[in-house]
Image (tube, rainbow, N blue to C red):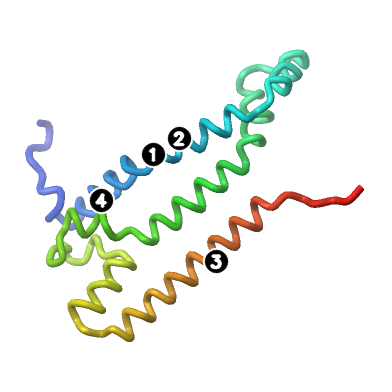
Amino acid sequence: GLIGPQDWLNNPSLAFFSIMLLSIWQGVGFQMVIFLAGLQSIPRELYQAAEMDGVNSWQKFIHVTLPQLNNPLVFVIISTTILAFKLFVQVWVMQGPAGHPQESTMTLMVYAVSTGFRMGKIGYASAITVLFFLIVLGFSILQQYLLREDQTVE
């Protein structure tokens, strides 16, 4: 009521923000389940030892909780980044095949589909999807590198 009615999907400055809000709302549940599983896997002994050392709640969070959530945090960041690159359904459902106000909601996948099926440039669209595959492969390799366990033989 403060700013009046807004045309959220046809205003170029608001359209991408609207799709971003939808994507956040859609994905936050999955991310919270991953963080909850990570929080539940932290041994209680670490918190008890920290309390015996006399640390406060903030120090427990910084020195106990965050280091233990490293793997879930990296997984959520990398998987969310990959999902952001493949953003297609949300844009297609909210904007339709014809609507993209001044191409403000054009993502890589929407561009590939539009190029291949609407403009008939199948080769160019294929090159875009190969580029997408290489981006996702790079992020997947980065995730494997960041989440690897140090294997030492004793």
Q: Which residue is mark 1?
A: 28
Q: Is 94 placed above or below 141 here?
A: above
Distance of mark 2 from mark 4, alpha carbons? 20 Å
Of the image marks 2 and 4, the number of the one nearer the N terminus: 4
- Residue 58 located left or right of residue 31: right
Q: Which residue is mark 2?
A: 32
Task: Specify the amino acid type for callout 3.
Answer: Gly
Task: Specify the amino acid type for callout 2.
Answer: Met
- At mark 2, the secondary structure is helix
Q: Residue at x 16, y 58 (%)?
A: 95
- At mark 4, the secondary structure is helix
Labelled pair 1, 2 in contact (Cβ < 8 Å): yes
In percent of width and height, residue 44 lies at 68, 20
Distance of mark 1 from mark 3, alpha carbons? 24 Å
Residue extending furthest toward the right: 154
In percent of width and height, residue 58 lies at 61, 23
Q: Is 82 placed above or below 130 here?
A: above
- At mark 3, the secondary structure is helix
Task: Specify the amino acid type for callout 4.
Answer: Ile
Residue extending furthest toward the left: 5
Q: Residues within 10 Å of mark 4 (few under 14, many from 20)?
A: many
Distance of mark 4 from mark 1, alpha carbons? 14 Å
